[in-house]
Image (tube, rainbow, N blue to C red):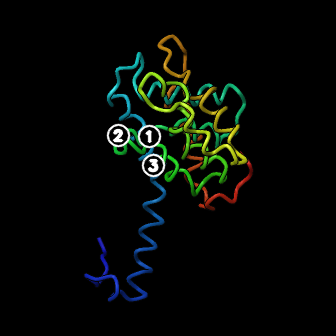
Amino acid sequence: METVSFTRMQDGTSQDYELLETLEVEYAKGLPVRIESALANLANSFSGYQVNRLEHSLQSATRAYRDNRSVDYVVAALIHDIGDELAPFSHSEMAASIIRPYVSEKLYWIIKTHGVFQMYYYGDQCGMDKNTRERFRSNPWFDEAVEFCEKYDENCFDPNYESESLDYFRPMLEEVFTREPTFGERGSE
């Protein structure tokens, strides 16, 4: 494999950075596969719930799909908890960072804040302020974040719900994660 000539970035040449750009573009093409693999790993994540973290994610995406949400929204629902493995205390921000280059700013914000909004359903039982989400009340997407948690998160722990498989969502993952990154310049959903 070809490598750059430098050991310090400041010493790189234009040819070095052209090479890195070429390699990065090629590597990015595998993003849908890596995301699918990370989702599959959620099946073995911590649980305690009646369903594992993968099934929770599949229920979220399936409900969004069956509500005729956009492909972007369905994929956001599918990956909303992908950060649980590596960022258990900031998983929302991690998931949002992964999807940000490919979806609208609104959808990015909903995923980024869903952890705080989700506390509404359990905060009182854990000694936390269930209304912490109120600090975002002035945000124009507040109601959409409330809706996301109500319809596609807090209710997705049902062992009797028949969700679609991860394979079912593969074309949607590919559609979203192989497009040209735009960092929030897409439509409203």
Q: Amino acid at mark 3?
A: Met
Q: Which mark is residue 82?
A: 1
Q: Amino acid at mark 1?
A: Ile
Q: Residue at x 48, y 57 (%)?
A: 29
Q: Which mark is residue 21?
A: none
**Whole-percent x, y for residue 105 in the image:** 65, 54
Label 2 belongs to which residue? 85
| Secondary-structure class at tag 2 | loop
Left or right, 184 with respect to 8, comes to right
Q: Residue at x 46, y 52 (%)?
A: 31
Neighbourhood count class around disc 3 (C-alpha, 10 Å): few under 14, some 14–19, many 20 upward: many
Pointers 3 and 1 in contact (CB under 8 A)?
A: yes
Q: Which mark is residue 94?
A: 3
Q: Residue furthest top?
A: 160
The quarter of the picture where the N terminus appears is bottom left
Pointers 1 and 2 in contact (CB under 8 A)?
A: yes
**Whole-percent x, y for residue 145 in the image:** 64, 38
Q: Reply above or below: 95 against 179.
A: above
Q: Residue at x 54, y 47 (%)?
A: 112
| Secondary-structure class at tag 1 | helix
Mark 2 and mark 3 lie on one chain; the one further toward the N terminus is 2
Left or right, 8 with respect to 105, comes to left
